[in-house]
Amino acid sequence: MKMLCVFSVTDRLKYIGHLDLMRAMQRALRRSGLPIRFSQGFNPHILLSFAAPLSVGMEGMREVMEIPIEGDVSPEMFVEILNQSLPALIRCQSARLVEDSSPAPMSQLWAANFSILPLEYQDEIMAAVPVLLSKTSIPAMRKSKKGMVEIDLRPLIHNVLVKDNSIQALLALHSSGTCKPDLFIKALSQCAGLEAPVPCKVTRKALYTQQFSPLEDM
Amino acid sequence: MDEKTLAAIDRLLPQVEKPARYIGGEMNADIKERAKETAAFAFCFPDSYEVAMSHLGMKILYHILNKQPDMLCERVMMPWVDMSDLLKKEGIPLFSLESRTALYDFDVVGFTLQYEMSFTNVLEMLSLGGIPVLSAQRGEEMPIVIAGGPCAFNPEPLACFIDAFVMGDAEKAIVEVTRLIKRMRLENKPRKDILLALSQIEGCYVPSLYEVTYHEDGTLSSFKPTNDQAPSKIRKRLELDLEHLDYPDAIPVPFTEIVHDRVSLEIMRGCTRGCRFCQAGMLYRPVRERSPERLVELAQKLIKATGYEEMSLSSLSSGDYGQLAELIRELMLRFADKKVSLSLPSMRVDSLLKESLEQVREVKKSGLTLAPEAATQRLRDVINKGISEEDIRRSVSDAFQSGWSSVKLYFMNGLPTETEEDLIAYGDMARLVIDAYHQVPKGQRSPGLRISLSSSTFVPKAFTPFQWDAQDTLETIKHKQKILRDVLKIKGVSFNWSEPELSHLEACIARGDRRMGKVIYRAWQLGCKMDGWREFFKYDLWMQAFEDCHLDPAFYANRERAGDEILPWDFVDIGVTKKYLWLERERSLLGIVTPDCRNGCDGCGLTRFEGACVS
Ligand code: SF4
């Protein structure tokens, strides 16, 4: 069986990298004494699978990972014990048992919801949101293995809501198309007539499937 | 810190290379409430986070201080260059990892001095932390700045920057010192009273209470206290009962990868083999062991609390631990199913137990590391490295037979009395290893023999029998390194050597006197920091600093001292007497070997410490 877990990484821990987070999870699981399945071979480790790496500098509120387990443990127990072994700023919120054959969360991931809080030029940025959305195409440059390539962001922006001083953006996060928040912010800043992208506090709020239901419920 | 500064820190972090260095929040990092009565201690490590977090001593003292109900200890490391530039630019003081408190806001700021090349970082950290770099310029409200660690045994080069040094085992001393400072600060006692009170604690040296005079030739003519309460000799702190000494049962687990990312278990302290170049061997006498039972208990707690997948046994010479085979067997038994591997770093060539070697391999296969230090028997006798060619042959054969195929050999070049013959013998050493490999039948040995030889330049250190000796000049070192490179052009053998300029500077500072402080200060002003990092080391600026201070580096590095010269560190009593060191020096020149004193006391002087070396 596998345990499908929802967890958050907040506050200062947004500065640890993806590999750091994986290592921290491995060690937390080792400390926990939970019945985890290890890989075979000379350097046994836990085959954790994360839905999507979290960029350095970004908090994640409902991240998803899968942990292979062996033996009996209830999801509630699992969450409780894991949380005792995790650093205070990483919290496991819920867990669900799934079959080994169930698809990996990464393969079901389609989009992510981001909360974007501009730290400067708030008014200009907010005013630029409808302008940006009214465009039929938003050309942007994205780094790829073959160097910089041009992409159109517009179809990758699924939905944008403005609330008080923050922007809720549902952006594509999928192998066939991804709109990273920094590209979105860059485009928005350009729309607002600003030369450099505005510094923003970005939080990844939740991950979604193609049906736009929460990834953890897939 | 106020909200504005905290927000500013948050804006800085995304701009630096590895922000995880500055965030704390690791598993087992302690965040304690600070009340008015709490003694707040900033544990400062003058090097990067990755180096600092690999250091065992820091973890021990961090644990001990945080265990005291009336104290808290937070960590501060040397920020990487990108971060220190930003801190300066934004006017943000250097802060602690845990609660982001500015360095100047602590009661005690304590540095651990692990190597001379980190001294400019001490100045940089003080300055970034909003604390006047010179001790004499610190106001009443400023923290008391203390320092310990191996380099505190010759404290003079840092005498004008550090308020008080703590020499020797710090487990108990650090608590006494911190408590005294806090109590007197709460009573609003003036700084000078606190310092005088500190000078009354055993092992504590307060440089401002002493005065040095010099002969015309630059050597010391006198060293004496200016206050009649200050002791004329400082005796190191010695904890004899390691078994009952506090040891962490949990340590912070870093998020980022660090140099030594594992549990390290200090199985014993001290080493009595008496290698004559080795400062730690003299400083940390006598040998004190923890029992296997205690170690297994600690190991279990630490693995449980950290989730580490690797553990190492740490000491100056782990191979000499009395019950090594039992300890390893016991640890393996407990951890095999927890998937924890065991590594033995400073294993010595002549104490490799074949049995334990095989057991270790079961868990983790890494290369065999040997440190013959010198390539000829004659020179090994001079330095009292009691290893024969036969020992080396046997060790590598055993290793090859057990399926290992990579060997690292460590040497020192520039040792006293070294000749060209000693250098040419490096080649023989490499060939000996190759032969031993080929003697194991093809099917039995692992393929792909890898031999690497490393040679560092000998740096004469205070408190060793070579403390009177001259280091080779830069030209000689470079010439010798060229010979070694030629001699070691052998297929399958790689050769590494240390940067001669760095060793030369290390030699200057390691045996520096108080005036060296001016050079360090000047070098720091000129922009020297992170000197231990090749990419930041600026030899030319250091040489300019010497010139600006009218001091000659050769006086410190390349001069042979007379037997009756007052050495700048003579006032420190490490247990081993100067007389004994001189005797060892004479034996060395005669090629006389001194056996390990476990098998019979050699009268080094340690018995003057109550309870030491009584069987
Ligand atoms: S006093 Fe004797 S037994 Fe003790 S460390 Fe010195 S030589 Fe060895």
Image (tube, rainbow, N blue to C red):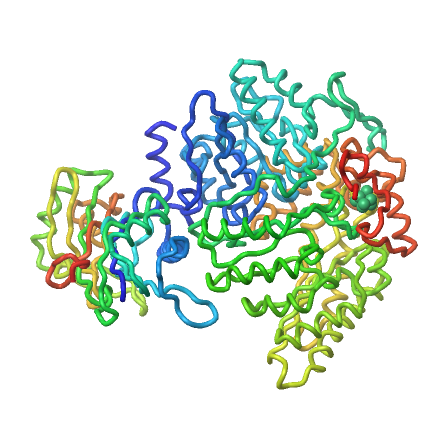
Percent coordinates x, y for residue B224 in the rendering? 79, 23
Q: Residue at x 58, y 39 (%)?
A: B246
The foreground one among B441 and A33 is A33
Task: Please provide percent x and percent y for residue A196.
Answer: 26, 46
Quadrant position of the N terminus of chain B in the picture: top left
Q: Residue at x 24, y 39 (%)?
A: A119
- Left or right side of A215 for B244: right
Along the horizontal axis of the image, is B108 left or right of B497? Answer: left
Q: Please tell me in which quarter of the rendered image ligand 1 is found.
A: top right
Closest to the observer: A71 or B564?
A71
Seen in the picture, residue B575 relative to B471 is either above or below; the reply is: above
Q: Classify the position of the C terminus of chain B by image quarter.
A: top right
Measured as percent of width and height from the top left, residue B456 is found at 70, 57
Say if B410 sits above or below A10 in the image: below
Q: How many marks?
A: 0
Which residue is rendered at x = 81% and y = 34% of the image? B608
In the depicted structure, whether residue B104 falls above or below residue B456: above
Residue A194: quadrant of the picture: top left
* Residue B436 locus on image (x, y percent): 72, 77
> Residue shown at 73%/49% (left/top)?
B271
In the foreground, B493 or B57: B57
Q: Looking at this view, is B131 or B275 the one in front? A: B275
| Furthest residue in direction right, as rendered | B590
Residue A51 visible: yes
Res B46 seen here: no
The answer to whether residue A63 is left or right of residue B374 is left
Q: Is residue A168 above or below residue A106?
A: above
Give the quadrant of residue B176. Answer: top right
